[in-house]
Amino acid sequence: MLLISLKSLVFWLQRPDKIQYRVRYWIWEKLHPDQPWLCQGTVEFCKNHLSTSMSMLEFGSGRSSAWFSQRVSKLTSIEHDTDWYKLVKRNLEKKNIANVNLRLIPLDHPLSEPEKEFYDQCPGYVAVLDEFEDESLDFIIIDGHYRTTCARKCLNKIKSGGYLLIDDTNLWNSLAALNIPQDWSIVNQSTNGIKTAIVWQKPLKS
């Protein structure tokens, strides 16, 4: 724990211009303990656009899983970390949440290994998308591992008029790497001064 704290301290001392934003977000997290670890504007968008008729897929579980479960019909949440999976599972059980299919799918590569541009064999974490019919999901959230690969592979699974939310889009030098079609509209772009999240909407069929 001390090592983690020292690493965190060094990280923020090297970025003094970001400290004020981190403090503000820390306060917001404490005041909203049940809300997802997303930008405030992103959370508000979800509040206004989710409905209990929707089917959602989430890459990267957390306290968001319980929050989203209250706003959609069914949520499938993919997690790669065993300890974190157990923690989220206990929380869902404690709250008697039954509409979340929490899946533990380990990574096929070391956590420290950067994501590759392409994989000869699709990682199992991403290949879970093959279990869903095309245009069967209303909302997909990418906030876990293999983010670029997830984004590229998930597009056909989203319904006409559905949404794709990608957190930490500031990680990419260019969003062109995600291969999101130009006719998909950016309907929300939010930042908290530390990170940025974007929501795209798939065009309605004519």
Image: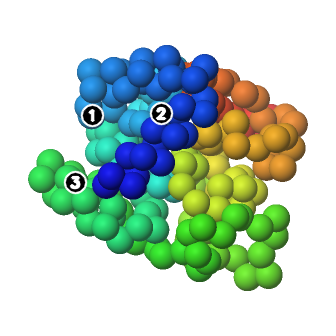
Please give the name of the residue rendered at 54% of the width and 74% of the height, measured from the top-left corner: 107
CB within 8 Å, label 1 to label 3: no
Density class for disc 2 (Cα within 10 Å; few <14, some 14-19, many ≥20) is many
Q: Which residue is mark 3?
A: 92
Vertical side of 152 occupied by 69: above or below? above
Disc 3 is placed on an element classified as helix
Quadrant the N terminus occupies: bottom left
So how many labels did they put on this image?
Answer: 3
Colour treatment of the image: rainbow
Q: Amino acid at mark 2?
A: Leu
- Residue type at mark 1: give it: Asp
Foreground: disc 1 or disc 3: 1
In this view of the protein, can residue 49 be seen by the observer?
A: no
Q: CA distance from mark 1 to mark 2?
A: 12 Å
In space, the residues marked 1 and 3 are separated at their CA atoms by 12 Å
Say few, some or many: other residues with alpha carbon within 10 Å of mark 1 (under 14 / 14 to 19 / 20 or more): few
Q: Is residue 186 left or right of residue 85?
A: right
Task: Tell me how far mark 2 sits from mark 3, CA to CA.
Answer: 19 Å
Q: Nearer the viewer, residue 70 or 36?
A: 36
**Element type at marker 2?**
loop
Question: Residue 44, position in %: x, y?
Answer: 46, 21
Q: Amino acid at mark 3?
A: Leu
Q: Which residue is mark 2?
A: 38
- The correct choice, above or below, for 7 with respect to 37 in the image is below
Give the residue displayed 20% in from the left and 53% down from the top. 91
Between residues 61 and 154, which one lies in front from this camera angle?
61
User: Is 14 left, or right, of 92 in this rendering?
Assistant: right
Crowdedness of circle 3 by 10 Å Cα count: few (<14), some, many (20+)? many
Residue drawn at (45%, 38%) of the image: 9
Q: Position of residue 28 (x, y in %)?
A: 35, 21
- Residue with the mark numbered 1: 34
Instruction: Give residue 198's quadrant in the image.
Output: top right
